[in-house]
């Protein structure tokens, strides 16, 4: 059937299956197990998942072998079972497929860095892949799906491994960030032609992002290659609900994007993390319709917050005199006086050139903006550190910054060192965020440091502001950080959000900033519950530029609620200019309603749309 696969995909769009790991997880398999080993220990469970996708209409089944290479299996003590796990994985899928659908041997990354980024040679990597390929060939797969690769060198080694052993078709898929570049920063304009030249039969992307961001990447791939294209997005971004990862995209939403993928030349469409047979069934229906006419998580209060309460009296005995809030910064002084403040968020630049962002900051200062907010831990490319950008803006543009600082990628001692250094070079305003979890795949191998969350780090800053380090030792003169935290009026678990907000205030937060708000009613419900918190709230505003962005925010961004009426309003404009104008009108209406409910706005600039931000500021500053 290998040849038949290419013949079939040249005649029509084929539907691949969805997530294997998501389904096994839902059936009670813990994430700390090897999902691939289930081919040997619980084959019936794996077969159930395959059969569910066959019934949903999949044309292609991927074997349960994504992590079945010697390196990943070795971490479970299973390195000597590579052959058996892969052969059995192929046979289980073949039995479920019978003669109805194609079977694809699924191969993922090794889970280690290879040269030039790591110490494993490219030839060694190729040998690891070849071992897996040989077993899958023995198990009689029809084709190979190489997926979720971040490193072009590594997927190249995997392609060569396949080609040395068989001429079966290859679907080569990179995983990308929101900006379309791979997780290592390689743009599709580079990796797509490279994969084509290596002999991949289909080129595409999977995992990491939802369908809206993936569509833009597909459009870019289609512009630089004549190869067949594949697309397997996540069902949005995962949200932790009662200890389980829940994905946000409905089957109908996924199906609507399947149609858009097809319009842009996609020949193989399916799903990755969070997709289920229900999603695949909806996608199948969309593919058929697009064909031409026949011819509760346990909430544990963070340890750092409890320690603050327990040791507070002791620490007060050795702490220095804290700097009064109005003396910390201009922003702190304005908030202490009850003045209305404005902040505009500017993302750090890629590379090390920062003339443009500094010029933007100067323009914002001229327009009366109080601070420029710099987000931390944007992972899509080689961006300057938020801390460095904040220093340069304050030094060269003469406007204060609000440094967003994430806990996710740093350990506690490192954060303390960073922040003491930031204070030494003049930064005072901080917005502390826990940071989103690393992108999760069917077989997550990404890790985060996360020694503490935003509550714990707020406690650390409060100690530094009293002249004490995390161990309670005096540091000399106290720091003068103006401490902000994030809070979300649109959180799905409002009781938990209120509890965490209270902990942040107790830990020492002096103001809070919300994500972009699109529903004033939800904000009012939240505000009534925190009315006695005693700290200012800065409301997030965002200028929607087009329908795609509205749908993305409504369906794929955790914690942001966009009412259907606003999505519908963004659907009406005829062209880009009209859509941007409607987005500005919506933002102005929201600003007018929120103006007397909050003590400031933070405006998110999307796609470098500084002109729209300035237009909004003209009405609000």
Image (cartoon, rainbow, N blue to C red):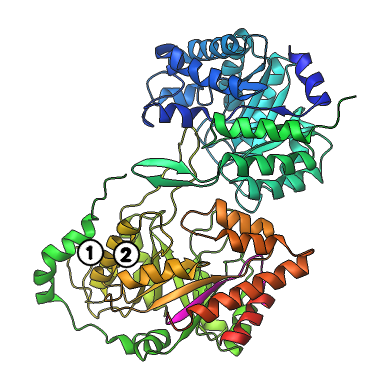
Which quadrant is home to the C terminus? bottom right
Task: Estimate the spatial distance between the alpha carbons at disc 1 and disc 2, rounded to whole Å.
Answer: 8 Å
Residue 164, which numbered label? Answer: none
Question: Where is residue 471 shown, x and y percent of the image?
Answer: 19, 63
Residue 153 image-quadrant placement: top right
Mark 1 residue crowding within 10 angstroms, few (<14) / some (14–19) / many (20+): some
Estimate the x, y position of residue 168 in percent, counting from the top left: 73, 17
| Magenta stretch bounds | 598-610
Q: Which residue is drawn at 70% across and 37% down?
A: 204
**Which residue appears at 66% of the width and 50% of the height?**
180
Between residue 316 and residue 92, name the one nearer to us.
92
Instruction: Report if residue 603 lies within the magenta region.
Output: yes
The quarter of the picture where residue 27 lies is: top left
Q: Position of residue 287 (x, y in %)?
A: 73, 33
Q: Which mark is residue 416?
A: 2
Image: 225 above or below 550: above
Judged left or right of residue 575, residue 153 is left
Q: Circles 1 and 2: CB distance less than 8 Å?
A: yes
Asked if residue 359 lies in the magenta stretch, the reply is: no
Q: Which of 442 and 339 is in front in this view?
A: 339
Query: In the image, is residue 341 above or below residue 308?
Result: below
Total numbered labels:
2
Q: Is mark 1 on a helix, strand or loop?
A: loop
Mark with earlier residue (1, 2):
2
For the point 41% across and 14% down, which residue is it?
42
Q: Nearer the viewer, residue 521 or 20?
A: 521
Residue for badge 1 = 470
Position of residue 396 relative to residue 452, above or below, is below
């Amino acid at each position: 059937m290998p040849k038949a696969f290419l013949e079939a995909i040249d005649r029509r769009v084929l539907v691949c299956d969805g997530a294997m790991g998501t389904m096994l997880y839902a059936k009670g398999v813990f994430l700390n197990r090897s999902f691939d080993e289930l081919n040997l220990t619980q084959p019936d469970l794996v077969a159930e998942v395959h059969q569910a996708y066959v019934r949903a209409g999949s044309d292609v089944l991927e074997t349960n072998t994504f992590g079945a290479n010697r390196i990943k299996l070795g971490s479970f003590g299973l390195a000597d079972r590579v052959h058996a796990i892969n052969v059995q994985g192929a046979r289980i899928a073949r039995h479920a497929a019978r003669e109805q659908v194609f079977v694809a041997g699924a191969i993922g990354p090794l889970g280690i860095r290879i040269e030039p980024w790591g110490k494993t040679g490219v030839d060694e990597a190729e040998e690891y892949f070849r071992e897996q390929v040989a077993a899958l060939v023995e198990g009689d797969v029809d084709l190979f799906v190489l997926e979720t690769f971040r490193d072009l060198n590594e997927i190249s080694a995997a392609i060569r491994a396949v080609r040395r052993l068989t001429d079966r078709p290859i679907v080569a898929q990179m995983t990308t960030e929101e900006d379309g570049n791979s997780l290592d920063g390689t743009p599709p304009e580079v990796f797509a032609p490279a994969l084509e030249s290596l002999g991949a039969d289909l080129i595409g992307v999977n995992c990491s992002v939802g369908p809206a961001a993936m569509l833009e990447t597909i459009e870019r791939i289609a512009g630089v290659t004549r190869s067949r294209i594949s697309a397997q997005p996540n069902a949005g971004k995962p949200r932790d609900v009662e200890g389980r990862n829940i994905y946000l995209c409905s089957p109908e939403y996924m199906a609507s994007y399947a149609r858009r993928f097809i319009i842009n030349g996609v020949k193989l469409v399916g799903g990755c993390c969070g997709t289920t047979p229900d999603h695949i069934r909806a996608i199948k229906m969309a593919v058929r319709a697009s064909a031409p006419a026949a011819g509760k998580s346990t909430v544990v209060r963070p340890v750092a917050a409890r320690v603050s309460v327990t040791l507070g009296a002791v620490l007060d005995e050795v702490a220095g005199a804290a700097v009064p809030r109005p003396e910390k910064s201009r922003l702190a002084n304005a908030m202490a006086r009850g003045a209305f403040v404005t902040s505009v968020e500017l993302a750090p630049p890629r590379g090390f050139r920062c003339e443009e962002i500094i010029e933007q900051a100067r323009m914002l200062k001229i327009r009366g903006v109080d601070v420029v907010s710099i987000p931390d831990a944007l992972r899509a490319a080689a961006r300057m550190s938020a801390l460095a950008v904040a220093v340069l803006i304050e030094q060269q543009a003469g406007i204060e910054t609000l440094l967003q600082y994430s806990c996710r990628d740093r350990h506690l001692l490192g954060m303390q060192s960073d922040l003491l250094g930031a204070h030494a070079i003049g930064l005072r305003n901080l917005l502390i965020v826990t940071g989103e979890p690393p992108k999760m795949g069917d077989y997550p191998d990404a890790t985060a440091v996360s020694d503490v969350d935003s509550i714990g780090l707020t406690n650390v800053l409060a100690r530094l502001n009293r002249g004490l380090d995390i161990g309670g030792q005096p540091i000399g003169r106290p720091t003068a950080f103006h401490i902000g935290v994030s809070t979300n009026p649109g959180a799905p678990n409002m009781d938990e959000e209120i509890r965490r907000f209270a902990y942040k205030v107790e830990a020492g937060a002096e103001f809070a900033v919300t994500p972009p708000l699109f529903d004033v009613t939800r904000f009012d419900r939240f505000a009534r519950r925190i009315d006695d918190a005693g700290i200012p709230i800065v409301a997030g505003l965002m200028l929607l530029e087009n329908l795609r962005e509205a749908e993305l925010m409504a369906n794929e961004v955790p914690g942001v609620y966009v009412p259907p009426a606003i999505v519908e309003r963004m659907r009406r404009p005829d062209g880009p200019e009209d859509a941007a104008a409607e987005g500005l009108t919506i933002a102005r209406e929201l600003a007018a309603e929120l103006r007397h409910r909050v003590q400031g706005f933070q405006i998110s600039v999307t796609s470098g749309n500084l002109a729209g931000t300035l237009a909004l500021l003209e009405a609000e500053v």
